[in-house]
Amino acid sequence: MRGTLMLAWILIICLFQVAVQSQRQYYSETRPYIPRPIKVTKLHFFMHESMGGTNASAVIVAQSNITSNDNNSSVPFGTLFAVDDPLRIGPEPDSEVIGNAQGLSLLAGINPRTSTTYFDFGFATGKYNGSSISMFSRTDLELAVVGGRGRFRMATGFALLNPYLISGTTVIIEFNVTLFHH
């Protein structure tokens, strides 16, 4: 027992010495911060969403177990959607696909037109190929840009939404996005 206790103390002292010695390696000379200029990029595209049939791009993945539908909506409070919508240049169903929007949308308010949404908009063509922007916000016709990758690294900004078409199971939303990034 006494030997085990002595060995434990020796190991603790050795580990303490290693920790003290290794901290010195993390310090370096301080260099002045030189901020990179901020770029402003404006994007315009249409998100096409289909909620029915075999080509659905938005599906219900969870729904609350409530007995009443106080908001008089076909989709009750507490419904969670998974989304993988194509992004197109125009509102026409055959316009060029430039990427896709993947994310989640939760009907988190009693008002059926209000939801809390997280989307990642990935671009697959043109000079923004491989870049994406992340948006997270309540969708009251405006989303907050909270990040990005590729050409939109460290992006902030906003997206103004304009419902272009809402009919049955098809929704087309126009996006006017303003990005501030490096």
Image (spheres, rainbow, N blue to C red):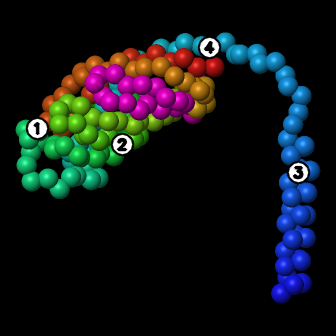
Local crowd size for mark 3, using a 10 Å CA cut-off: few (<14), some (14–19), many (≥20): few
Q: Nearer the viewer, residue 64 or 59?
A: 64
Quarter-wise, where is residue 144 in the image?
top left
Note whether 12 is above or below 99 in the view shown.
Answer: below
Return the x and y of residue 173 as percentages of the image width and height. Answer: 29, 25
**How far apart are labels 4 and 3 at the CA level?**
40 Å
Q: Do the numbered discs 1 and 3 sit on residues whose CB atoms are within 8 Å?
A: no
Choose the circle earlier in sequence order: 2 or 4. 4
Q: Quadrant of residue 126?
A: top right
Task: Name the mark on residue 20.
Answer: 3
What SS does tag 1 mark?
Answer: loop
Q: Which residue is mark 4?
A: 38
**Residue position marked by numbered label 2 in the rendering:** 104
Q: Is residue 132 left or right of residue 115?
A: right
Q: Amino acid at mark 4?
A: Ile
Circle 2: element type: strand
How much space separates mark 1 and mark 4, taking CA atoms? 43 Å
* Kind of residue indicated by mark 2: Leu
